[in-house]
Amino acid sequence: MDWIRVDGLEVRCIVGLHSYERHRPQPLHLDIALGLDLSAAGRSGHIGDSADYARVADAITALLRFREYRLLEVAAEEAAAFLFALHPSVGQVKMRLDKPEALAGRARSAAIEIVRSRGAFGATVEAREFGTRTEILTSREALIETIMIAPGQRAVFEEPTPRLEAQARLSRFSDVPLPSPTVSLGGAKSEYGKDEESTRLVRCLLLNAEQATSSNP
């Protein structure tokens, strides 16, 4: 298996259990490795055959800033699921989350490391009138899913809470990388699709707004 690595990514976000951690962002340092076959990209020269490391960094930064995590374990699990949803060619994710201020004065940092393979979350696929919906991961606070909208079809959603989402049209010839995710506020009706090409939509929806809403999107 080949690997794409992003090492030393720094994101300032809300993470921690203590009250003082819930009201100010603090730094996290991340090392991310994506396992996939890079031979096609090596021959074609097309980024669509790989995973753009800049978009990987943008996606994880957007997710961590969108959410307010209490545990690094939850952040790592959701981040891995989000990367699998964004990059269908990725078969494995290795990730280290380092919290340098966690043990200030006692240790240089506290960290966790995880390794996840595609399918580890028990993703479920269901047919919809517009195409398919795949639920990648559901936690107590959030849902990560992929929506595939068939050419000419339309999908309409109306969720009461904010969501982080990225969407892209899928070319007939290659899987176009999704753009950086953006935050959409809840309560408004959203419409997707109705294009000549398929649309892939990746979303993180909050299930418990009081616990999971971020104050620093």
Image: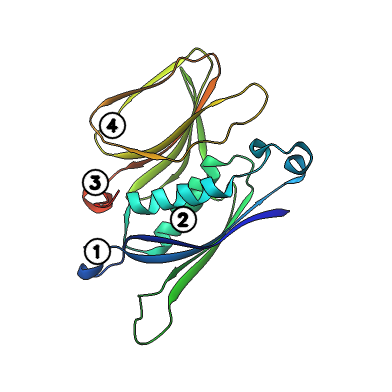
**First along the sequence among labels 2 and 1:** 1
Marks 2 and 3, how far apart in space? 19 Å
Q: CA distance from mark 3 to mark 4?
A: 12 Å
> What residue type is disc 2 on?
Glu
Q: CA distance from mark 1 to mark 3?
A: 18 Å
Q: 48 or 111: which is nearer to us? A: 48
| Disc 2 versus disc 1: nearer the observer | 1
Q: 10 Å neighbourhood of mark 2: few (<14), some, or many (≥20)?
A: some
Residue 19 in the image: state x and y as whole percent. Answer: 20, 68
Residue 39: x and y in percent read 77, 44
Q: Position of residue 125 (x, y in %)?
A: 52, 32
Residue linked to disc 4: 159
Give the percent coordinates (x, y) of residue 154: 43, 16
User: At x 46% / y 48%, what residue is drawn?
Assistant: 58
Q: Can residue 7 be seen by looking at this rendering?
A: yes
Q: Name above or below for residue 105 compared with residue 199.
A: below
- Residue position for label 2: 77
Q: Residues within 10 Å of mark 3 (few under 14, many from 20)?
A: some
Name the disc covering residue 191, or none.
Answer: none
**Dot 3 and dot 4 residues touching (CB under 8 Å):** no
Q: Which residue is mark 3?
A: 209
- Name the residue type under label 3: Ala
Q: Alpha-carbon distance for marks 2 and 1?
A: 22 Å
Q: Mark 4 vs mark 1: which is more N-terminal?
A: 1
Disc ID at residue 24:
1
Answer with mark 3 or mark 4, whichever residue precedes in sequence.
4
Are discs 2 and 1 less than 8 Å apart at CB?
no
Location of residue 175 by image quarter: top right
Q: Quadrant of residue 21?
A: bottom left
What residue sits 73% from the left and 41% below the top? 41
